[in-house]
Image (cartoon, rainbow, N blue to C red):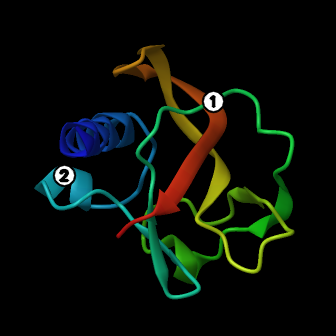
Amino acid sequence: MKKPIIWISVLIIVFSLAGCSFGNKSSETGDLPPTITLFDRNYVAPYMSVEDLPDEYTYIGDLSEETANDTGLAGCKMYAVKEKDSFDDFYLYQECGTPIDGNTVDTTQLQWAYVQWIVSE
C-alpha cells in the first residue's frame, strides 16, 4: 500500500513543480525534479502550494544562492519549526502556478504561495 502512495507522491512532485517558477534547466531537459540542499540534506517539493503557513512555522531567513542549487529560488523566505535541531521539512514563500485541483496547476496564472519542501531519501 505504501509503494503506490510513494509513486503517486512522486508524480505529484513532477506535476506540481512544473507549475512553479524555477530558473533551472532540469524541467527543460527531463532531469530529476529540482532539489534544495540544506545542512547536507536534499529537499524536494512534492505537494501543491498552500495559501496559509501552518502555525508552528516561523521565519528562519532567506534561501541563499548556494542552497538554492540553481532553482531560481534564491532570496525566497524560508519558514520552519525552530524548536527542532534539524528539520525534515520547511516552507518557501515562492511564485507558483495556481492550483486548479489536487493534481493540476495552471501555469498561466502565477501566484505567490507557500510550498513545502521535504527531505528526499
- Image quarter (top left, top right, bottom left or bottom right) of the N terminus: top left
Q: Check the image and name the residue furthest to the left.
A: 30
Quarter of image, res 4: top left
Residue 56 x/y as whole percent: 85, 48
- Image quarter (top left, top right, bottom left or bottom right) of the C terminus: bottom left
* Residue tagged 1: 50
Classify 76 as above or below 7: below
Residue 35 x/y as whole percent: 40, 66
Q: What residue is shown at x 47% (from left), y 19% (from top)?
A: 99
Residue 91 x/y as whole percent: 66, 52
Q: On the picture, is 25 further left or further right than 21? A: left
Classify 109 as above or below 7: above
Residue 3 x/y as whole percent: 20, 45
Pick whichever of labels 1 and 2 is earlier in the sequence.
Answer: 2
Quarter of image, res 23: bottom left
Q: Check the image and name the residue furthest to the front.
A: 1
Q: What residue is shown at x 70% (from left), y 27% (from top)?
A: 51
Q: Nearer the viewer, mark 1 or mark 2?
A: 1
Q: What residue is shown at x 65% (from left), y 34% (from top)?
A: 113
Q: Which mark is residue 106?
A: none
Identified by mark 2, the residue type is Glu
* Residue tagged 2: 28
Q: Please tell me how crowded label 1 is: few (under 14), some (14-19), or many (20+) other residues with Cα within 10 Å.
A: some
Q: How much space separates mark 1 and mark 2, taking CA atoms?
A: 25 Å
Q: On the picture, is 111 further left or further right than 24? A: right
Under circle 2, the secondary element is helix
